[in-house]
């Protein structure tokens, strides 16, 4: 009965002229803090009758089972019944601080990473294996080890900048450190599988106007808000 009532309410709200009501939105933590949260004041000004329940976690939530209206996901998405709206690509970089490279040397092949201290991220599709491909199509997979494993990429930054290891991170986390020279991109001839930023919603419809409004707003604003690669002048050697 509760589900039927919510469905009826959603259908009624979907037909309303002015979007109103609550949108439950799940976003990866660092991306949510850096990219999504700063946009919300403008959204609330444009849609004063819409409220947002912003759930920040790097774990992949069950949109249907946990009752979310929408999620932002940064990855190569597997096939599923969810509806995905691709916004833009999100490059990833393998990086180390100059002090680490000075002490331990610079890897020139992905397999060299097995001899180095590396930081790992728990929510990668293969969290203990890093995959690379070069321009010739050669592939390499390595299982790096190191002193720190995290469930949020931002948490490796202090140890990374201190020169304690190598990390593989998306641009929205490590881009500023690359631009400032605090870290350097290594293995430039090798590329990691590039993900993308997606808006994901459960199947079915019509979606309430409040969900459509937030989705359209984020789709319009996020590509311009997020930096698209290190600024010129950053060390990428």
Image (cartoon, rainbow, N blue to C red):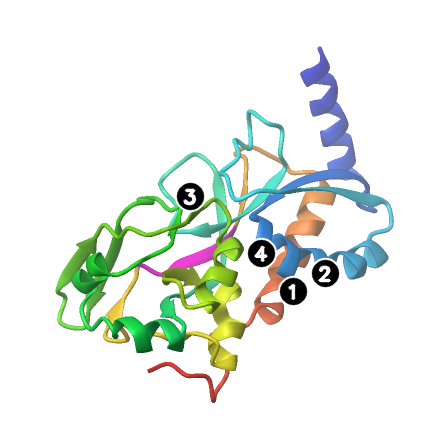
Contact (Cβ within 8 Å) of mark 4 with mark 3: no
On screen, residue 71 above or below 30: above
Residue 10 picture location, percent across and down = 73, 30
The answer to whether residue 230 shows anywhere in this view is no
Name the mark on residue 31: 4
**Viewer-side residue, 197 vs 144:** 144
Residue 59: % across, % down: 50, 39
Residue visible at 41% across and 83% down in the picture: 235
Q: Which of marks 1 and 2 is nearer the N terminus?
A: 2
Between the C-alphas of marks 4 and 2, the distance is: 12 Å
Mark linked to residue 39: 2
Q: Distance between the residues labelled 2 and 3?
A: 26 Å
Residue 123, numbered label: 3
State which region is magenta. 193-198
Identify the mark nearer the N-term, 1 or 3. Answer: 3
- Mark 4 residue crowding within 10 angstroms, few (<14) / some (14–19) / many (20+): many
Residues 150 and 123: in front is 150
Report if the CB atoms under discs 1 and 3 are less than 8 Å apart. Answer: no
Snapshot quadrant of residue 196? bottom left
Query: To which residue does mark 1 refer?
Result: 221
């Amino acid at each position: 009965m509760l589900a039927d009532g919510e469905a009826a309410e959603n259908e009624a709200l979907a037909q309303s002229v002015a979007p109103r009501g609550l949108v439950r939105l799940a976003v990866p933590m660092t991306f949510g803090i850096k990219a999504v949260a700063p946009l919300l004041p403008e959204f609330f000004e444009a849609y004063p009758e819409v409220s947002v329940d912003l759930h920040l976690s790097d774990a992949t939530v069950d949109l249907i089972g946990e009752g979310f209206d929408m999620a932002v996901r940064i990855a190569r998405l597997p096939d599923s019944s969810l509806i995905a709206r691709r916004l833009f690509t999100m490059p990833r970089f393998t990086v180390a601080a100059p002090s680490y490279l000075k002490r331990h040397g610079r890897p020139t092949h992905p397999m060299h990473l097995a001899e180095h201290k590396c930081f790992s991220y728990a929510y990668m599709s293969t969290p203990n294996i890093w995959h690379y491909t070069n321009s010739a199509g050669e592939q390499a997979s390595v299982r790096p080890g190191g002193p720190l494993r995290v469930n949020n990429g931002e948490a490796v930054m202090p140890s990374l900048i201190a020169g304690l290891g190598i990390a593989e991170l998306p641009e929205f986390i490590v881009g500023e450190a690359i631009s400032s020279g605090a870290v350097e991109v290594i293995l430039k001839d090798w590329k990691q599988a590039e993900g993308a930023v997606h808006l994901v919603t459960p199947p079915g419809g019509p979606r309430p106007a409040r969900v459509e409004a937030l989705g359209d707003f984020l789709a319009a604003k996020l590509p311009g808000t997020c930096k698209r690669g290190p600024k010129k002048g950053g060390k990428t050697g």
